[in-house]
Amino acid sequence: MSTVSVPLTPKLEEAVINLVKSGLGANKADIIRKAITSFAEEQAVQAVLRSEQEAREGKVLKGDLRKLVKRMVI
């Protein structure tokens, strides 16, 4: 496991401390790990939603993958 040092504004540090005090994490590092995990999950959800929107708009590739690749190669 690697360690990353990230400067926090006083407001963010206070928020992290309050989250620990409220029991949402064991310590500050745990809160930060949970925040990063939550952010990554949200980005994955957004990617799926964008893909679904593109599919609704007809922006999808259909057909034989080999033929599609040949059409895409310059």
Image (cartoon, grey):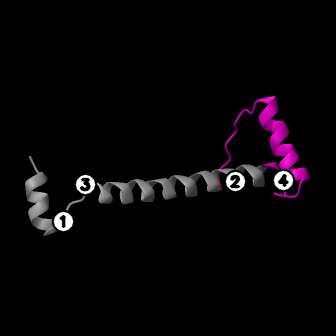
The secondary element bearing badge 4 is classed as loop
Mark 1 vs mark 4: in front: 1
The answer to which quarter of the image holds residue 16 is top right
Q: CA distance from mark 2 to mark 4?
A: 10 Å
Q: Nearer the viewer, residue 1 or 37?
A: 37
Quadrant of the image containing the N terminus: bottom right
- Crowdedness near tag 4: few (<14), some (14–19) or many (≥20) residues, C-alpha within 10 Å: some
Q: Mark 1 and 3 residues: CB-CB less than 8 Å, in contact? A: no
Residue where numbered disc 1 is placed: 62
Residue 33: give its label: 2
Residue at image point 57% right, 58% down: 41
Give the numbered dot on residue 27: 4
Q: Which residues are magenta?
A: 1-28
Residue at mark 1 to residue at mark 2: CA–CA distance: 39 Å
Q: Amino acid at mark 4?
A: Asn
- Alpha carbon distance from label 1 to label 3: 10 Å
Q: Is residue 1 left or right of residue 66?
A: right
Q: Amino acid at mark 1?
A: Lys
First in sequence: mark 3 or mark 4?
A: 4
Q: State the residue in front, 44 or 8.
A: 44
